[in-house]
Image: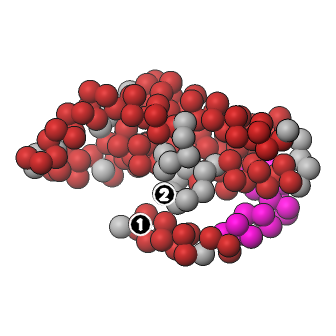
Amino acid sequence: MIMIVLALLVIINTENVELMVRQGIQKYGLGGVLFFSFIADLFMQPFGPEMPGLFAILANLKFPNIYLATVIGSTLGGLVSFFIGRHFLLQRINIICQIGKYKNYCKLFSKYGRWGLLLAAIPPIPFVLFCWLSGAFHMKIKNFVIFGLVPRAFRIGFYLGLAWV
């Protein structure tokens, strides 16, 4: 419930959030990029982890450093979201999966969750939901890294690279 409220606040205040991110990066540089990329992959909201990196490009920071800060922040946000799912959503998932109409969805995620995570890591859709589900369904951390975090790093590089050129 808290996540939904935070997401709605970000959506309602998009311009203020963009201004806050831009000012944070101007003031804190790469530390701001890392922090806001972390936040972007920790909460469900309309901005991807590339947004802070894009503002850093506009601030003329060095590209390799921008990429590393963005990937580190996004990776940490994804890992925290994974563990939130594992520790706080497991009981709810178990209850939901006992309800007849949701049983098939649960079976699908248990069987194909890695591929769903991979598909969620690449396009600009809310990745955090798949991180939560991956944790709640006890996906192996190795699979989470391979199918979620590594493709996410490639996605970040692709979008930041397009902006850099």
Q: Secondary structure at mark 2?
A: loop
Measuring from the top left, give residue 103's x and y in whole percent. 14, 41
Compared across the picture, whether 102 is left or right of 86 comes to left
Where's the C terminus, which quadrant? top right
Residue tagged by mark 2?
44
The amino acid beneath tag 2 is: Met
At 77% from the left and 36% from the top, the residue drawn is 161
At 52% from the left and 60% from the top, the residue drawn is 45
Per the model, the C-alpha gap separating discs 1 and 2 is: 8 Å
At 88% from the left and 55% from the top, the residue drawn is 59
Residue 42 makes an appearance in the image: yes
Asked whether residue 21 is drawn in magenta, I would say yes
Q: Are marks 1 and 2 in contact (CB under 8 Å)?
A: yes
Residue 80 makes an appearance in the image: no
Q: Secondary structure at mark 1?
A: helix
In the rendering, which numbered label is found on residue 4?
A: 1
